[in-house]
C-alpha cells in the first residue's frame, strides 16, 4: 500500500466518526427552531366554524356566588341567543392564574356569557382558586375526567373559545390571555361573533 493510501484512510475514518455528531447537531438546531418559532395561540382548531360539541357538565360543588351554587354547563346554555366565551382552566395551571385578571375584566360585560370549564381538577382546589382570585364566570362545569375537553379539541389549559348566538364556534385562543391578546384578538373575535 502506498504512503498516500495510508494517510487517506484515517481521514476517511474521521469523517465517518464525525457524521453522527453533525447529524445530531443539525437535528437539535431544527428542533430548537421549531420550539421557539411557533405561536401556540395560532394552533388550528377543526371545530372553528362548526357547532359546539355537546355539554352536560355538573357544577363545581361548593362554588357559591351570592349564597347559591354556581350552576354547571349544558348545551342549551351556549346557544341562548347571546355570544358565549368559554374558558378552559384548572387550579393547578400557572398560566390560568396569569390570565385571570383578563377574565375578571371580561366579566364586566353584560353583552356576553362568560362560562368556565374546569379541567381535571379537584373541586375543593377549583373553589379555592376562584374564591381567592374572584369568580368571573356565571356558570362553571366540572370536567373531572377530561372527556368533554377531548370532545372540544383542547390542547391544554388555558384555552378560550368564542361561540356565536347560534352555538357555532367562531374563534379559539390557545394559551393564557394577556392584556394585548385580549384587546387585539379576543375582543375583535367577540365583535365578529356578534356581527359587528
Image (cartoon, rainbow, N blue to C red):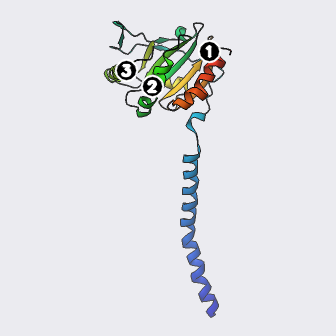
Tell me where residue 18 appears, x and y as whole percent. 55, 71
Q: Is residue 63 visible?
A: yes
* SS for callout 1: loop
Q: Quadrant of residue 24?
A: bottom right
On the image, numbered disc 2 is attached to which residue?
A: 101
Q: Helix or strand or loop: what does disc 3 sit on?
A: helix
Give the distance between the C-alpha atoms of the residues marked 3 and 1, in whole angstroms.
26 Å
Within 10 Å of the Cα at label 1, are there few (<14), some (14-19), or many (20+) other Cα atoms?
many
Q: CA distance from mark 3 to mark 2?
A: 12 Å
Instruction: Choose the circle earlier in sequence order: 1 or 2.
Output: 2
- Within-10-Å neighbours for mark 2: few <14, some 14–19, many 20+: some
Instruction: Work out which quarter of the rendered image holds the N terminus and state it.
Output: bottom right
* Image location (x, y in percent) of residue 85: 54, 18
Mark 3: few/some/many CA within 10 Å (<14, 14-19, 20+): some
Residue ID for mark 3 = 130
The quadrant holding residue 68 is top left
Q: Is residue 44 left or right of residue 116?
A: right
Whichever of labels 3 and 1 marks the residue nearer the N terminus, that label is 3
Instruction: Using the image, tell me which numbered label, if any, was put on residue 164.
Output: 1
- Is residue 86 depicted above or below 175 in this figure? above
Q: CA distance from mark 1 to mark 2?
A: 23 Å
Amino acid at each position: 500500500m502506498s504512503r498516500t493510501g495510508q494517510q487517506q484512510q484515517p481521514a476517511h475514518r474521521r469523517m465517518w466518526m464525525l457524521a453522527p455528531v453533525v447529524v445530531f447537531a443539525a437535528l437539535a438546531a431544527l428542533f430548537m427552531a421549531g420550539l421557539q418559532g411557533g405561536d401556540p395561540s395560532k394552533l388550528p382548531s377543526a371545530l372553528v366554524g362548526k357547532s359546539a360539541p355537546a355539554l352536560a357538565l355538573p357544577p363545581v360543588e361548593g362554588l357559591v356566588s351570592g349564597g347559591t351554587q354556581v350552576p354547571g354547563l349544558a348545551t342549551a346554555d351556549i346557544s341562548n341567543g347571546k355570544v358565549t366565551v368559554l374558558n378552559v382552566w384548572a387550579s393547578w395551571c400557572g398560566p390560568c392564574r396569569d390570565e385571570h385578571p383578563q377574565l375578571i375584566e371580561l366579566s364586566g360585560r353584560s353583552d356576553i356569557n362568560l362560562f368556565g370549564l374546569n379541567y381535571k381538577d379537584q373541586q375543593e382546589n377549583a373553589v379555592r382558586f376562584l374564591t381567592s382570585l374572584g369568580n368571573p364566570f356565571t356558570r362553571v362545569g366540572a370536567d373531572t375526567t377530561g372527556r368533554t375537553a377531548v370532545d372540544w379539541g383542547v390542547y391544554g389549559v388555558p384555552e378560550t373559545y368564542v361561540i356565536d348566538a347560534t352555538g357555532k364556534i367562531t374563534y379559539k385562543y390557545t394559551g393564557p390571555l394577556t392584556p394585548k391578546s385580549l384587546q387585539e384578538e379576543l375582543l375583535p373575535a367577540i365583535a365578529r361573533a356578534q356581527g359587528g
